[in-house]
Image: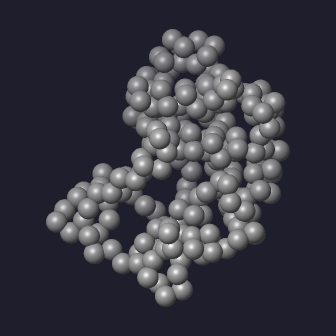
């Protein structure tokens, strides 16, 4: 399968994040935003020029296909995508100049990306290194051949807490239309709250 210019943008974000030119969390946020918005594009639209010229249309298409995603979230995705694509264009034009610029931003300037203020109604979750203790356990779940999800859970986790985690993750999937099947049915929880069907 031939890679597109937008695949190169994703690779650029991964590489520059790993090399420290962009904060890894920033790179992850940008990669996620790109994956979300690029998912609505047709194969012949997978170019930097198309994205830069048609961002409003891409946002509208994404919103129409993902009615559960708030407008502010879509705007934030678009903002991150534009940062990613513009950085990629500058990097491709003159890698040395881009690297010097990225290096000179330093901690004070961040990654050239101002953090958007979170809506007051939403909880802020601090990004912290998970700590495993006597009452917790580290769980690693291989979800793809090249990707594991790792998280720390209490050793005495309840089914109610498992359901909370499942519902949060179910709301993030890109290949489910919530108008066709409820999340509860999608997850196939038993009505007696004893777990999920296998």
Outermost residue, front side: 198
Q: Position of residue 102 (x, y in %)?
A: 48, 24
- Residue at position x 73%, y 59% from top? 66
Foreground residue, 72 or 143?
143
Q: Position of residue 43 (x, y in %)?
A: 78, 33
- Say whether residue 106 is left or right of residue 131: right
- Say whether residue 143 is left or right of residue 93: left
**As displayed, is residue 22 above or below residue 178?**
above
**As displayed, is residue 22 above or below residue 155?**
above
- Residue at position x 53%, y 62% from top? 169
Foreground residue, 104 or 172?
172
Q: Is residue 195 visible?
A: yes
Q: Position of residue 51 (x, y in %)?
A: 75, 34
Foreground residue, 103 or 28?
28
Foreground residue, 9 or 148?
148
Location of residue 5 (image quadrant): top right
- Residue at position x 80%, y 57% from top? 64
Q: Is residue 52 visible?
A: no
Q: Position of residue 133 (x, y in %)?
A: 19, 62
**As displayed, is residue 58 above or below residue 1?**
below
Location of residue 130 (image quadrant): bottom left
Screen quadrant of the N terminus: top right
- Residue at position x 75%, y 31% from top? 46
- Say whether residue 51 is left or right of residue 24: right
């Amino acid at each position: 399968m031939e890679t597109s210019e937008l695949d190169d943008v994703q690779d650029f974000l991964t590489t520059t994040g790993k090399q420290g030119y962009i904060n890894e969390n920033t790179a992850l946020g940008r990669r996620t935003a790109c994956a979300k918005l690029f998912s609505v594009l047709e194969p012949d639209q997978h170019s930097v020029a198309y994205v830069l010229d048609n961002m409003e249309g891409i946002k509208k298409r994404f919103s129409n296909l993902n009615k559960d995603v708030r407008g502010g979230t879509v705007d934030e995705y678009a903002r991150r995508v534009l940062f990613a694509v513009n950085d990629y264009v500058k990097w491709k034009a003159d890698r040395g100049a881009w690297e010097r610029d990225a290096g000179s931003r330093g901690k004070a300037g961040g990654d050239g990306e101002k953090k958007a203020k979170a809506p007051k109604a939403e909880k802020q979750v601090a990004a912290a290194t998970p700590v495993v203790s006597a009452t917790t356990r580290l769980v690693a779940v291989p979800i793809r051949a090249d990707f594991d999800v790792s998280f720390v859970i209490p050793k005495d986790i309840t089914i109610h807490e498992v359901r909370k985690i499942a519902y949060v993750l179910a709301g993030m999937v890109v290949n489910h239309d919530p108008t066709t099947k409820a999340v509860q049915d999608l997850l196939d929880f038993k009505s007696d709250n004893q777990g999920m069907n296998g």
